[in-house]
Amino acid sequence: MSDATTSPTPSPAHQPRILSGMQPTSDSLHLGNYIGALVNWVSLQDDFETYYFVADLHALTVPTEPAVLRHRSRVTAAQYVAGGVDPVRSALFLQSHIGQHAELGWVMSCLTGFGEASRMTQFKDKTSKGQTANVGLFTYPMLMAADILMYDAAKVPVGEDQRQHLEITRDLAERFNTRFGPTFVVPEPHILKATAKIMDLSDPTSKMSGSTSPDAGLLLLSDDPKRLTKKLRSAVTDTEREIRYDPERKAGVSNLLVIHSALSGTAVPDLETHFEGKGYGDLKAEVAEVVVEAVAPFQTRMAELLADPAELDRIVASGAERARVVADTTMARVRDRVGLLAPLV
Ligand code: TRP
């Protein structure tokens, strides 16, 4: 490590900032997004200055009908709010409303080695699964680095699958600071715990994923109670009878216990005791009750928000206004540091 990488980063005059986002690439968030991410975002609002955005520019890496993308971006923003993101305490915005993300993304691309970008596993995974390899998918991590560094985010709550993207973000921040002088806060990853990892109901050895799980494996936050109950009733378990947490040998049953525990707040060992002598049918029925009860108020709020698009537009406009103040300051600093002349007006 060179001396310069240890040079101090600016100490900001505000509460530590948290930033995170999700891509609007499906018609609804699922229970894994809710338990694994959203619940966490919501609780972070108490102690941090929080920035939550809809990563619509990132979603362009997947070819999508314009009307569908518009719909999904609105739904995603509404679901953040329905899940408890408070637009008063958090800046909630659409990534594309802050043009500086793309601008800083370009600067980050110019700091990234071609070989370095080629080693990103998400790019390799997605293209090996047949997703068209557009250049946007290749430079995806540099745009993500821009999202994070723009706001001097101290912590970035994301799932394990985003760890490598955070590492390259840290590398880029340090590289920039070394080359141009202390400019960016080097963010800490805040990898969300494995216990909050919700698995696919139809294949409990893979993660519940909006892009890869079949519908039967996904509990969508937009599914009505009947559908949620039906999907849980068909969840894959095992041929034993015992209700015990053992993710290695009993992935399906363990997943159901984790879902119950996350939503009811009852610890898994207490659930094991509670279900002693009972069957898988009882477990599934009770998890369905807990899920339906948790999702019902969420759905009511989501329906209200989607019924009033003007209100939703106002929410993201006020979030963008707050985000833009920070983005303007950061970009002015970056332009100066890298040697771009300031325009007269
Ligand atoms: N890549 C993230 C995902 O797919 C979404 C994302 C884009 C993000 N920019 C970000 C997450 C910045 C955290 C911070 O989940």
Image (tube, rainbow, N blue to C red):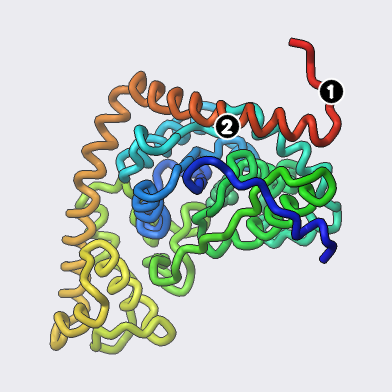
Does 41 appear above or below 190?
above
- For the residues marked 1 and 2, what is the alpha-carbon distance in whole angstroms? 20 Å
Q: Secondary structure at mark 2?
A: helix
Q: What residue is rendered at 70% in x and 62% in y?
A: 121
Would residue 118 appear left or right of 270 to someone viewing this image?
right
Q: What residue is rendered at 34% in x and 52% in y?
A: 43
Mark 2, residue position: 326
Quadrant for the C terminus in the image: top right
Does 233 appear above or below 281?
above
Q: What residue is rendered at 68% in x and 50% in y?
A: 9
Q: Amino acid at mark 2?
A: Val
Q: What residue is rendered at 63% in x and 39% in y?
A: 150
Q: Amino acid at mark 1?
A: Leu
Classify 10 Å Cα crowding around label 2: few (below 14), some (14-19), many (20 and above): few
Residue 319 position by quadrant? top left
Does 317 appear above or below 212?
above
Q: Residue furthest top?
A: 345
Q: Are marks 1 and 2 in contact (CB under 8 Å)?
A: no
Mark 1, residue position: 341
Q: Secondary structure at mark 1?
A: loop
Would residue 84 appear left or right of 52 to someone viewing this image?
left
The answer to whether residue 129 shows anywhere in this view is no
